[in-house]
Image (tube, grey):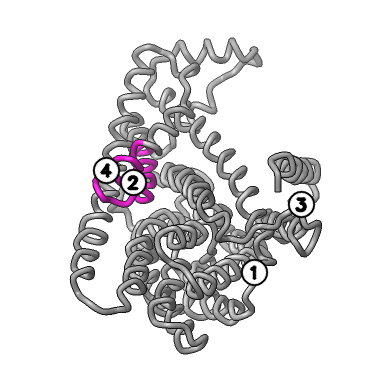
Amino acid sequence: MSFLHWMAVLGSILLILTLASAYLRWLPVTTSTLYLAFGLAIGPLGLGLWHMNFIEVADWLEHLTEIAVLFSLFSGGMKLRLGFADPAWRSAYLLAGPVMLACIAGVALVAHYGLGLSVGLSMLIGAVLAPTDPVLASLVQVNHAGDFDRMRYGLSGEAGFNDGVAFPFVFFALLWIQHDGTGGQWLSGWATQRLLWAIPAGLLIGFLLGRGVGRLAIYLRTRHRDAAISPNDFLAMALIALSYWLAETVGALGFLAAFAAGIGLRHAEVDSSDNSSVPAEEVASALPKDGGSLDQVKEQVSDTSEPKVVAGLLIGEILSFGDIVERVLEVLLVTLLGALLAFHWDWRAVPLGLALFCIIRPLSVVAIVRGNALCERQRWLMGWFGIRGIGSLYYLAYVLNHGLEGEAAQEAIGLTLSVVALSIAVHGLTTQPLLDRYERNKAA
């Protein structure tokens, strides 16, 4: 598929989505489901514009999915405004820790005893499918920094944490396969480097960098009154790149660093707002515009030296920029997934995926996530909203580029792509109706 073909495909789907947005809004499906269908249409089962399998694109797909997850993690972190000791974080910690481990174990057991896969490959598939997706699950996460709904907050924190926390277990399964489950030297090195060091170091590096750079940027822009003309999107890309680079350089987890950098930048805004309960971007958006021109508005904003307003402008522009990048990459990657399905669809993913979506994940959440002012209905919904997506595609490309080969590689590709596609379809059809009912009940 040539570059011109890709331009035509992306241009067409973006145009269709734009012109038909008024109609699509009323459909009981997410836009990701439509992207998946569009990908199937351009693949071998449709127009035949795509002719490459996953192994052929794994090299560049690893980096493309990596970028998509990094932007999504950073943006997601910026929406989480509460302090780490707040009870709303408790469900996020439980979901990204014990619940994720239970899901890895459950999927591995089904793959090994139900599908007859080897122990190592079963653990690998469980780990690759472990992270919930920060890109595709935007509907069920917090809508803005002032959204403190306990269910949404827990799901947002989970998506940020477990895309990084899953990596040590993906690496463990890959090492198990490479060593045939024998020998103990690699196990101690894995536990020390990949668990005890990589997770806390990644979080600490990202948070300190995000908070420090954020406070410096707010201070300088307040002092020089240049909040309206400074390139805030550049600041976002700088924080993502530097946090990821610093973490990976010292052997920490870059995904966790990017997520924590977003949280750190948000905490810089909280500091500038004197711990106000109102997010700064809401204050900035409420500035009187008097119907003036864009230049007059910029001049008006630049004339203020209030740190909270400066922070609000910075945060608001970064969130808007991150949202655009996320949506563009989501269109591209989910369309690509649909085109690849014709080569890799595996019917065994149906019982595996349904076991994960309907049994393993919900029961794990209901059993483990207790207290925290969550009612029974919220826990069951959290159990259902375990959407798999771009994060799993990244881990799949990673293991293929780092030693997984042969029949095991084909098994992993088929099951992972098929379960992710099944998740997009099943959750895409049910998420909006369930959320609408949840919001109605909450309002009542």
Q: Taking 403 as reference, is 334 above or below it?
A: above
Q: Position of residue 114 (x, y in %)?
A: 50, 88
Q: Residue at x 64, y 79 (%)?
A: 347
**Label 1 crowd (10 A; few <14 / some 14-19 / many >=20):** some
Question: Is-magenta flag for residue 264?
Answer: yes
Q: Write down the region rendered in magenta.
A: 242-267
**Label 3 crowd (10 A; few <14 / some 14-19 / many >=20):** some
Q: Which mark is residue 257?
A: 2
The residue that label 3 is drawn on is: 24
Kind of residue sitting beneath label 2 = Ala
Can residue 437 be seen here? The reply is no
Can residue 177 be seen here? The reply is yes
Kind of residue sitting beneath label 4 = Ile
By secondary structure, the bulk of the magenta-drawn segment is best described as: helix
- Asked which secondary structure carries label 4, the reply is helix
Q: CA distance from mark 4 to mark 3?
A: 41 Å
Q: Answer with mark 1 or mark 4, whichever residue precedes in sequence.
A: 4
Q: Answer with mark 4 or mark 3, whichever residue precedes in sequence.
A: 3
The residue that label 1 is drawn on is: 426
Q: CA distance from mark 4 to mark 2?
A: 6 Å
- Asked which secondary structure carries label 1, the reply is helix
Q: Position of residue 200 (x, y in %)?
A: 24, 53
**Residues at discs 4 and 2 in contact (Cβ within 8 Å):** yes
- Foreground: disc 2 or disc 1: 2
Q: Position of residue 234 (x, y in %)?
A: 46, 27
The residue that label 4 is drawn on is: 205
